[in-house]
Image (cartoon, rainbow, N blue to C red):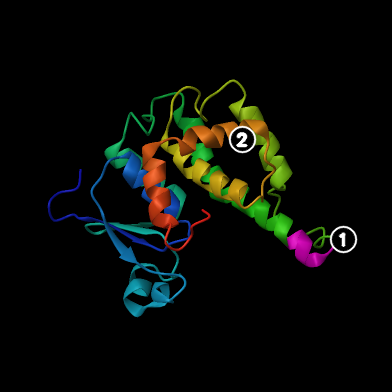
Amino acid sequence: MATANEEIVLHYSVASRSFTALWMLEELGLAYRLVDRSLFTGANMSPDYLRINPMGRVPTLQIGDVVVSENPAIGIYLADRYGYGTLAPKIEDPDRGAYLKWMVYSTAVLEPAVAVDGARLDYGAKGPPANWGFDAGDAKDVARLLVRALEGRDYLLGARFSAADVVLGGSLSVRLFTRMIPPEPALLAYNDRLEARPARQRAGAITWPASLFPAA
């Protein structure tokens, strides 16, 4: 656990991937301080923040001397440190392998697949060159895989909610909202279960405050 001199700090921006890290912190019931690194004002490129995250990306987590960026890494770190055995299956748990796979899948496959679809639009009807990028499939491939994975299950690990549902579910939820992933009934039902969680609702209210995003 964090000690008194190890304050949990999250560098974030509204309307960004910070949503997933916020959701993790809320699920764990942790006290934390937010530092606004707005992508819209350029605060994410301030010299003091670039010393923490040279890419100027959000979110970035700081706990004492520990700095973690990228949502899957933040999710794994927080769940192992504060939710080991609950939100994070223990290393000897048979679910640990699937858990780690889904954590990484969110940004290693789901998000690139959506980006590939966007690139096809940019290149026109013929799509990008055959050797463009890497083989992440497309949004339809991702939807089909997730529908199969969720068949007969409430969550990615079955009846058990885990941090994998936060990390992958956060990416999926945004892409369903923006209609970048096919709205398969199984995915919509899964997303409804996630949206019913109070921690997710609190994270959403911070990421898309009603004063700025009334439709969200």
> In the picture provided, is 205 more to the left or to the right than 150?
left
CA neighbours of label 1 inside 10 A, class few (<14), some (14 to 19), many (20+): few
| Label 2 element class | helix
Rendering coords of residue 72 (x, y %): 45, 48
Placement of the N terminus among the 4 image quadrants: top left
At x 50% / y 23%, what residue is drawn?
158
Residue 104 at x, y = what percent?
52, 44
Vertical placement of residue 81 versus 71, above or below: above
How crowded pointer 2 is (Cα within 10 Å; few <14, some 14-19, many 20+) is rated as many
* Extent of the magenta region: 119-125
Within the magenta stretch, is there residue 151?
Answer: no
| Position above or below: 84 against 8 | above
Look at the picture and state if 16 lies above or below 26: below
Q: Earlier in the sequence, mark 2 or mark 1?
A: 1
Instruction: Judge from the rendering whether residue 194 lies leftward or rightward of residue 119; answer left or right.
Output: left
> Is residue 120 within the magenta segment?
yes
Residue 76 visible to an observer of this rendering: no
| Of marks 2 and 1, the one in the foreground | 2
Taking the image as drawn, is residue 124 in sight? Answer: yes
Instruction: Please state if 52 lies on the left or on the right of 155 as rendered.
Output: left
Dot 1 corresponds to which residue? 126
Q: Residue at x 49, y 32 (%)?
A: 193
Residue 150, image x and y in percent?
Answer: 59, 28
At 52% across and 42% down in the image, what residue appears?
168
Residue 46 x, y percent position in the rendering: 37, 78
Amino acid residing under circle 2: Leu
**Which residue matches tag 2?**
187
Task: Judge left or right: residue 33 versus residue 152.
Answer: left
